[in-house]
Amino acid sequence: MKMKLLHKILKGISLTGALFVFQACYGTPQVYESERGEASMSFTLLSGETAQPLQGIQIYGRAGKGMGQDSLLGSTDANGQCQVEIPYIMDIEGPYLRFEDPSNDYSVKDTVISDLRYRNIVIKLNSSKQ
């Protein structure tokens, strides 16, 4: 009787130990509500030469490079700031963003945001008239 009880206790400890090691190696399973989403991010756009804020710079975006048309997400205010909701799809490169000056005084800048945890991003645009 004591041997059966001891065997059950050791079996339970072994199973618990195996589960602990699995979780320690691989972490807890991640559950995603959706494969699509939006990340709220804010940008400050500055002149690469003078570091002054740039007003009216348009921000375009899409879920990933090569994934359909760019859509206008917003444009910068007098302080060079803009807050946008960036579309993304899990497991796909992106989101892909483009910063464009409608007056063509500054060069277009493309980028891919690899980490959506960044929230206050400063982008410097170079003058296209050099």
Image (cartoon, helix red, strand yellow):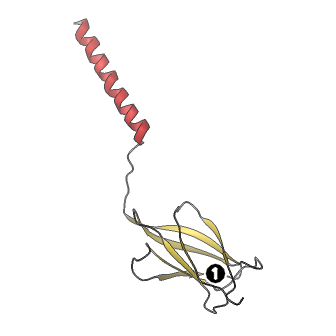
Task: Single out the residue that lies furthest toward the right.
Answer: 50
Left or right of 106, for residue 4: left
Q: Indicate the quadrant containing the C terminus: top left, top right, bottom left or bottom right.
A: bottom right
| Quarter of the image that includes the N terminus | top left
> As shown in the figure, which amino acid type bears the numbered disc 1?
Thr
Res. 45 image quadrant: bottom right
Q: Nearer the viewer, residue 64 or 28?
A: 64
> Percent from the top left, x then y, of residue 4?
23, 11
Among the 4 quarters of the image, the one containing residue 122: bottom right
Instruction: Give the labeled residue for mark 1.
Output: 76
Residue found 40% across the figure and 42% down from its top: 26
Q: Residues within 10 Å of mark 1 (few under 14, many from 20)?
A: many
Q: State the residue at coordinates (39%, 76%).
A: 67
Where 105 sits versus 21, above or below? below
108 in relation to 41, above or below: below
Figure check: 9 above or below 66: above
Image mark count = 1
Q: Position of residue 94 (x, y in %)?
A: 47, 69
**In x, y percent, where is residue 37?**
43, 67
